[in-house]
Amino acid sequence: MRHVSVEVRQSIVPPRDADGLTEAWRLKECIRDEEGLFKQSRDFFSHVYETYRVYRYRAPADDSLVGFAIIDGQGYILFLAVDSEHRGEGYGRQLIEWMANTYGLVSCHVRTTNHNAIQFYERIGFRKQKRVKDYYSDDGNAYYLVRPDDA
């Protein structure tokens, strides 16, 4: 694994602030097109983006979005997305660490068929707590994953 570049800028978008919403939507939609994930509607995504805290990394050279995570006030990760050009560089891990430093225990749901995401989360200390049948609107199943604050 490559390490996070020191040239990438961290920022937090607080609730009720739409800064970067269009760019985050575009990244989410690229992942949807490439991987068949993140099938949520624009209205739902916009609501989540503007309601909860958004952690993000930007490349200072062109201010492009490298990755982002949206987390609720209880440490539940609603979205975690890293641009495919930057995967394997440690940004996903760093987003998780950044949020865990604030929330301690963090958790999320992951599609049972998303083996790459499951491996990623387990590699950084998440554990499967339960399987949830028909969790997604298309009746897809999910695992509920938890990363204890001592991971």
Image: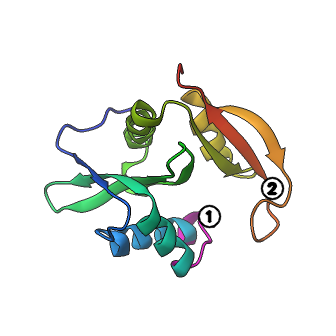
* Label 2 residue SS: loop
Q: Count up the numbered dots.
A: 2
Which amino acid does the dot numbered 2 rest on?
Asn
**Mark 2 Cα shell of 10 Å, populated few (<14), some (14-19), many (≥20):** some
The quadrant of the rendering that contains the N terminus is top left
The quadrant of the rendering that contains the C terminus is top right
Name the chief secondary structure element in magenta.
loop
Question: In the depicted view, which residue is nearer to us: 7 or 50?
Answer: 50
Quarter holding residue 124 = top right
Q: Which mark is residue 141?
A: 2
Quarter holding residue 138 = bottom right
Residue 120 lies, in percent from the top left, at: 57, 38
Residue 42 lies, in percent from the top left, at: 52, 79
From the image, tell me which residue sits under label 1. 37
Looking at the rendering, the stretch of residues picked out in magenta corresponds to 33-42
Q: Is residue 127 left or right of residue 16?
A: right
Q: Earlier in the sequence, mark 2 or mark 1?
A: 1
Q: Is residue 138 above or below residue 61?
A: below
Residue 76 lies, in percent from the top left, at: 57, 46
Which amino acid does the dot numbered 1 rest on?
Leu
